[in-house]
Amino acid sequence: MATGEIWLKVPPTIRVNYEGGLRPWVGGKDLILKTIGILGVDGATYSALEYAGGTIKSLPMYQRFTMANMAVEAGAKSGIIEPDEITLAWLRGRARQESRVFKSDLDARYERILTIKADGLEPQVAFPPSPANARPLSDVGHINLDQVFIGSCTNGQIEDLRDAASILKGRKAAKGLRLIVIPSTPAIYRKAIEEGIVGVLLDAGAVIGPPCCGPCLGGHMGILAEGERALSTTNRNFIGRMGHPKSEVYLANPFVAAASAVLGRIGGPDDL
């Protein structure tokens, strides 16, 4: 504080190449859960994760945000994606100054290079008590739920809410299940109202909360009791993360979360 300087170590970079088109109901949340499942929660400690490859080049911005957000769940200092036209298009009308684009050198040295085939990837579900416990939806089995939470910094963008609403429209959350939805920001909340998304969610039996972390860290709304199970679109599911230490939190994308809310158990849109 006295000098205005801080000691930092420049992190090495782990490059993860994703190749192939994505199947229906699969997105950035599934790519990052699969990656954390391979690396582990400490596999990228003090490193930067660089996401690259053909899959990333066609990934929409909101799903890139999810992947960058959850780099820390593998221990990384940051998660980065080389800026492209999708990035620059998102910045137009938002940035207050002209953007400068930085790219990795062609001869850049990486601590490790990992390749993930994305074309055969199913929606992923991370079992408690770690985001690294990811497995394909088809391997989940029958797991009943008490609560589904859609939102937070990880999956509370307007597009995430659209994805969830596309599954919930004309359907109802299962009897006895709490469905909680929290938009990431007031601007997203307002847009969801204007687009009629909030109405769809309310008709499905959801409770809409104010923009905040909500139950993600056991701080507000939807705190789990002993023995309760929740499926959440949040970023982590450690013991006691969302309430009682004997509760369970599973992680998945908004499509799976919305379908699971209707089913009353973990399942995907195809089950509907």
Image: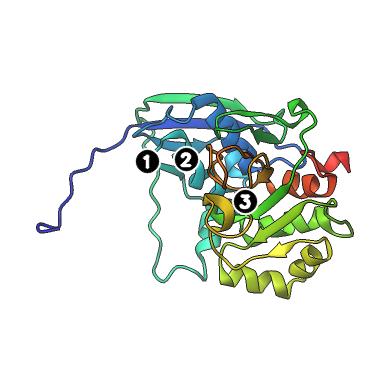
User: Separation of disc 2 and disc 3 at Cα?
Assistant: 17 Å
Q: Nearer the viewer, residue 43 or 55?
A: 43
User: Separation of disc 1 and disc 2 at Cα?
Assistant: 7 Å
- For the C terminus, the quadrant is top right
Q: Earlier in the sequence, mark 2 or mark 3?
A: 3
**Mark 2 Cα-neighbour bin, 10 Å: few <14, some 14–19, many ≥20:** many
Q: Are marks 1 and 2 in contact (CB under 8 Å)?
A: yes
| Residue 54 is at least partly visible in this image | no
User: Separation of disc 1 and disc 3 at Cα?
Assistant: 23 Å
Disc 1 versus disc 3: nearer the observer: 1
Could you say where residue 146 lies in the image, as x and y percent from the top left? 74, 46
Disc 2 versus disc 3: nearer the observer: 2
Q: Earlier in the sequence, mark 1 or mark 2?
A: 2
Q: Residue at x 46, y 45 (%)?
A: 82
Q: Which residue is mark 3?
A: 60
Identify whether 158 is placed above or below 127: below
The kind of residue tagged 3 is Pro
| Residue 218 is at least partly visible in this image | yes
Q: Secondary structure at mark 3?
A: loop
Could you say where residue 224 lies in the image, as x and y percent from the top left? 63, 48
Q: Secondary structure at mark 2?
A: helix
Could you say where residue 197 lies in the image, as x and y percent from the top left? 75, 66
The kind of residue tagged 1 is Lys
Q: Which residue is mark 1?
A: 77
Q: Residue at x 69, y 69 (%)?
A: 192
Q: Is residue 261 left or right of residue 213?
A: right
Q: Is residue 189 left or right of residue 92?
A: right
Could you say where residue 60 lies in the image, as x and y percent from the top left? 62, 51
- For the N terminus, the quadrant is bottom left
The circle on residue 71 is 2
Identify whether 213 is placed above or below 120: below
